[in-house]
Amino acid sequence: MRVLDLAIIVVFLVGMPLLGVLIGGKQRSAKDYFVGDGKISWWVACLSVVSAETSTLTVLSVPTVAYLGAFTYLQLAIGYVIGRTVVAFVLLPRYVAGNMTTAYNYLGQRFGGGLQATASVTFLLTRLLADGVRLFATAIPVKVVLAAYGVDAAYWQITAVLGVAMVAYTFFGGVRAVVWVDAIQMLWYVLGGAAVIWVLSTRLPDGWFGAAVDAGKTQLFDLSSAPLSNPYAAVTAVLGGAVLSMASHGADQLVVQRLMACNDVRASQKALIASGVVVFLQFGMFLLIGTMLWSFYRGLDPVSGLGLTAPDELFASFVVTELPSGLSGFVIAGILAAALSSSLGALASSTVSDIHQRVVRREVTDAEKLKLGRLWTVVWAGALIVFASLFTTTKNPIVETALAITGYTYGALLGAFVLGLVAKRARQADAIAAFLVTVAVMAFVILALRFSKSTGVFLGVDFTKPGKDSVALAFPWYTPLGVAVTLFVGGLLSLRHRTHSPTESNPTENKPA
């Protein structure tokens, strides 16, 4: 790692928070702090959504997926576009036209404050776990860079610095700063990816693409007969990706907050649907990089053939060892940018709007909400730093932890929204019971059910770690199964009521809870 590269990384880590504070300006109300007072353009929100859902794991791992396999990962992105389109026309109008601060306000209006708080707490815990993993993953390349200069920094020290960088622009600039910094960082890592493609294209031999096609590296659809065990079987990836995207972009405040910051319903719909197209192209870019790396390294095994300690080091290793000085630092900064999208504003807004008012049982003034929003931004930043530091001794691949977290709760979250739309008789007690049952069922499914890796045949119940020939249920099925359990249990319980719920008729006409 050369001095110029290190200088670029330092400028990025210092400059992005300062730019966020400058762009955000002074926040004069809670609405301005939490949703930008509805003044964010749709295209900025679109880039922010893409940045928020893209992590260091995505940038580092997707090229490895193509290097070891093919383009079948792109099937998930096809499902993402379908799922976002459904959310854009079914859920978004209820959020934006309802003048809400969080997605869970809708559940409060439809069912009651109990479910609103339950969903919000679930979101807070899920986001704390997921973003703790994300923050730790970001610290890994920083530690490697510092080690190259003889600096032995502890992971907790690195995560603390990264956490301070995130909290600075979120605290002072609110969601407006978060959205704009997200957009800039997204453009940064895409330009970095494009630069890698350009460098590789000048160093690959003629006919490399034809050789990749002949080797099956460009296969898109996988019509495998094992959809329960293979996450990239066509039906699994497309259907699972669609429902997963409905949950992540319709029931997760991290993304919904950014969409609420748009001017109106139509603008938020454009931002959401366009984000699906951008993610499809983004995945395609990183998969192409993986295929080009396969040609560059002649298909050698990343560990035994290239001497790496893990396959996911492939892309970063190429950036550090093969790119010229300056460009290498720019791309590494882009890798960091993919992980520094702040979720602190979403955590704070959900805490204040969904939980605090229910606890204090009184109307909170706008000035109080703004003060509390900033306070909880700092509190959640501290929690993320502490949680990320807990991973410093883990021996498990970090990507496995990241993929498993949302599987426990996303189905219950999305299922609660769908239950409110389709089960007219369902009351709050029905929804809460269905929610809790779903989380328990999904924990059992993820931890205990085992399937044949090659055929997808169900093998039985085993709470030990999957073996060489057995796997857990393919992760794209987690959210669809969770939604199905929620609807079944909630719908069944709702049959004991003879009339429609009194809050069912048109909950968006009520004031936010």
Image: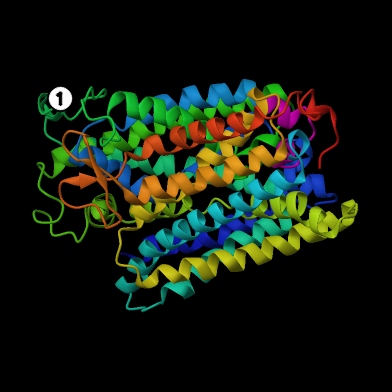
Counting other residues with Cα less than 10 Å from the Cα at mark 1, is it few (<14), some (14-19), or many (20 or more)?
Answer: few
- Image quadrant in which you'd find residue 7: bottom left
Of 424 and 278, which appears nearest the observer?
Answer: 424
Instruction: State yes or no: residue 76 in magenta.
Output: no
Of 439 and 45, which appears nearest the observer?
Answer: 439
Residue 416 lies left or right of residue 314; in this view the side is right
- Image quadrant in which you'd find residue 486: top right
Q: Which residues are magenta?
A: 92-107
| x, y percent for residue 392 | 39, 71
Q: Which quadrant, please, contains the C terminus? A: top right
| x, y percent for residue 178 | 63, 48
Looking at the picture, does residue 374 appear above or below residue 334? below
Residue 239 lies left or right of residue 417; in this view the side is left
**Residue 406 appears in the picture as rendered:** no
The structure residue drawn at horizontal position 66% and vertical position 38%, both measured from the top left corner, is: 430
- Image quadrant in which you'd find residue 329: bottom left
How does the figure colour the protein chain or chains? rainbow
| x, y percent for residue 280 | 41, 28
SS at mark 1 in the image: helix
Of 236 and 31, which appears nearest the observer?
Answer: 236
The structure residue drawn at horizontal position 90% and vertical position 54%, both measured from the top left corner, is: 362
Looking at the picture, does residue 82 appear above or below residue 197? above
**Residue 148 appears in the picture as rendered:** yes
Which residue is identified by label 1? 213
The structure residue drawn at horizontal position 22% and vertical position 32%, both measured from the top left corner, is: 70
Of 108 and 336, which appears nearest the observer?
Answer: 108
| x, y percent for residue 483 | 51, 33
Q: Which amino acid is tagged 1? A: Val
